[in-house]
Image (cartoon, coloured by chain):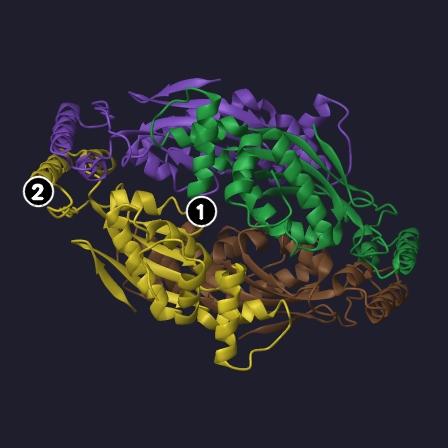
Chain colours: A brown, B yellow, C purple, D green
């Protein structure tokens, strides 16, 4: 489906989603045992749910994303507990020379220095591997800018919480970029729910309808 | 999709599912950054995950069910926390005369007595409603055998736990019937994962491959 | 500790709590590796956390309550998933003649009618038990007003969410009464956190500082 | 309370716990509305719960730990979702020169090389800080062996799952050492529950009674 590049070597890819706007309306209607008559009615209902803060029907939309991001971003990401994650293992796979090097605006013109340091660390990693050191031990010298990958399955309610925290200028710049890309996938797949969220429940300051 | 009758007036309906066997293999392979070459390989991998108790990849399969069941069954059901539920409201909808009447084998030939009692309760409910008593108050006289309905979204790992507890002869007979129907939906939609579960992780005694 | 009567035969009892206001400040300070110098400073910090919506430190306060409430209240209660519950079993214990009878203001002067109906149901229950019907079957005729009991362990963050939903005039009157009693226990045990919550995070309209 | 050194510079400290063995017995007894007559009876009950896999009463014991561990250990640790964490921030605090250097047995006699690499990274970090680079950016060059700290509040049921995964020879050596220290705190504070766990529910191969 959608694949969006983020930072210098990362991405957010929407692998699959299910339920969609329809599932929200369906789940909400069971409270009243009512039926949907039109897409327009569903839209008004979803708006109302967001307005009143009735968030439980949003749990029936579920997304699976494939994310590639630096480890310091992954660390912030995985603090969101209501989600399912399977990540690349540093015990079982050997890493490539893939690091996030922040642009000069972010590093007070020290990007070169940073890149140098990451390369040196990677050379040590390679040396250790060549000496027969286990991957799980050798990787201890690798920097937090190293890219990793994971699958992330999350329902729309928990995703909204993620966006409230991370698609906001108080979050670190790098995870902001990911959060905006995630939001874009949400918008494309569930336009009504996304719009109801941004208008009524969103607490950050980076997303627009 | 699948709709299976359970007890005298209830059912289990698989509304939708996503991920399926494929998603399990995909999520598991990211640990090793390996690719699938064949369905046969995926099958062996899924078997192995179940055997070793590596259950996290099963979270990337998600189901939505529509359930109709008596309230005493709903009460046992909703103790399973890792799932999303929207249920018919007794505050906002008026109930019909729909009760579970256990067969004579379950009630020492007292089914008539039980049905009579439920009917009397329902007549009182109707009387109260006609007197202008709020639905949320009137329903307090209704019995635990009253049928209710809900949507239930749950991932396969949490579903396995549900089946371990409820598709077992230690569970109450009525929820056993529901659990077996849920398992059937699981089997039809994700045959490889279902079979790996029953062979390796299932702790109950009602399910077979 | 605190035990508060609720409705005609129910109660909320704070069995134990841990962490308290101190634990919130301690957990929050680790972000900055700072130390507390005074209770006044802790107080200002807790206020700030609530104001900024930094709720995770509130998870380090944990309460255990003993609750006695009618089943229709228990049903609303147990939809709050981030908590631990052990409840009296209707399969293994025989129920007493304990029902919630709403006052006449709630029942349009039909309290007598309701009580009568509940008594009739209980007589049938007794009859069934005397005929050798299993408790788990006989209880199906019992009404939703039947009292049950449970232990409830929950952290302060999840408790705040419970209060936002249930200590509010949109909730059903009966659970409102319980929520207010729960809030009272919260206030007594963690006065600073409670006050910061009510001022900054509380969305309902029944609680005051 | 208990503070146990782990690896070269880390530790596990039990800050507080609540409930204890008593809470498990109390919570379990409510199912049957029975009372405890003696510590001996409680002990037999707790053993039985573990034997039958009735794990929910274990949720009423809750621990708070203070952990100091390398980031690669923290990454494995924080995949356990049913727990509450507040961690030192690399955005708001400046790191010290504290890295885990694995002993020569773990590094094929390359410990010196590893330490050198870590020191170089730290010098770059210092240089970046001195140039006015933000802490959140500068830390990207720091290695996964860097020590971090967090508070961890977790109930005994979830802790048992942590021990099943991490107090086992399949886990990485370093987290094994932490898991064994955590288990020791569990044993000291809740001896009956700990012993029932190890005898009946423990799937790993490092713990003994």
Rendered residue at 69%/32% (across/down):
C26
In the depicted view, which residue is nearer to us: B88 or B29?
B29
The local secondary structure at tag 1 comes to loop
Answer few, some or many: residues within 10 Å of disc 2's Cα (few below 14, many 20 plus, some between 14 and 19).
Answer: some
| Image position, residue C95 (x, y; %) | 24, 28
Splitting the image into 4 quarters, where does residue C168 fall? top left
Answer few, some or many: residues within 10 Å of disc 1's Cα (few below 14, many 20 plus, some between 14 and 19).
Answer: few
**In the drawing, does residue A173 fall left or right of residue B87?**
right
Q: Are marks 1 and 2 on the same chain?
A: no
The subunit carrying tag 2 is: B
Residue B57 makes an appearance in the image: no
Kindly check if marks 1 and 2 are in contact, taking CB atoms under 8 A apart as contact.
no
Residue D7 makes an appearance in the image: yes
| Image position, residue B123 (x, y; %) | 9, 38
Q: Is residue B88 above or below residue C127?
A: below
In the depicted view, which residue is nearer to us: A28 or C8?
C8
**In the drawing, does residue D72 fall left or right of residue C70?**
right
Q: Is residue A197 above or below residue B97?
A: below
| Image position, residue D127 (x, y; %) | 93, 55
Cα gap from disc 1 to disc 2, whole angstroms: 49 Å
**In the drawing, does residue B175 fall left or right of residue D22?**
left
Instruction: Report which residue position mark 1 lands on.
Output: A53
Rendered residue at 77%/48% (across/down):
D90
| Image position, residue D73 (x, y; %) | 71, 51
**What numbered label is drawn on residue B109?**
2
Splitting the image into 4 quarters, where does residue C76 fall? top left
Splitting the image into 4 quarters, where does residue B130 fall? top left
**What numbered label is drawn on residue D178?**
none
Closer to us: mark 1 or mark 2? 2
Q: Is residue D15 above or below residue D159?
A: above
The local secondary structure at tag 2 comes to loop
């Amino acid at each position: 489906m959608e694949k969006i590049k983020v930072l210098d070597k990362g991405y957010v890819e929407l692998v699959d989603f299910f339920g969609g706007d329809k599932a929200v309306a369906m789940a909400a209607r069971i409270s009243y045992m009512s039926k949907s008559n039109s897409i327009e009615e569903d839209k008004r209902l979803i708006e109302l749910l967001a307005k009143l803060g009735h968030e439980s029907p949003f749990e029936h939309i579920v997304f699976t994303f494939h994310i590639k991001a630096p480890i310091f971003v992954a660390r912030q990401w995985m603090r969101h507990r209501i989600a399912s994650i399977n990540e690349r293992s540093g015990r079982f796979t050997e890493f490539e020379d893939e690091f996030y090097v922040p642009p000069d605006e972010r590093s007070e013109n020290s990007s070169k220095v940073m890149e140098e340091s990451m390369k040196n660390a990677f050379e040590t990693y390679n040396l250790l591997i060549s000496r027969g050191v286990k991957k799980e031990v050798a990787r201890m010298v690798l920097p937090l800018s190293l890219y990793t990958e994971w699958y992330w399955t999350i329902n729309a309610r928990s995703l909204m919480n993620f966006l409230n925290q991370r698609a906001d200028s108080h979050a670190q710049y790098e995870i902001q970029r990911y959060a905006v890309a995630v939001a874009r996938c949400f918008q494309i797949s569930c336009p009504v729910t996304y719009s109801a969220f941004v208008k009524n429940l969103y607490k950050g300051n980076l997303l627009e309808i």
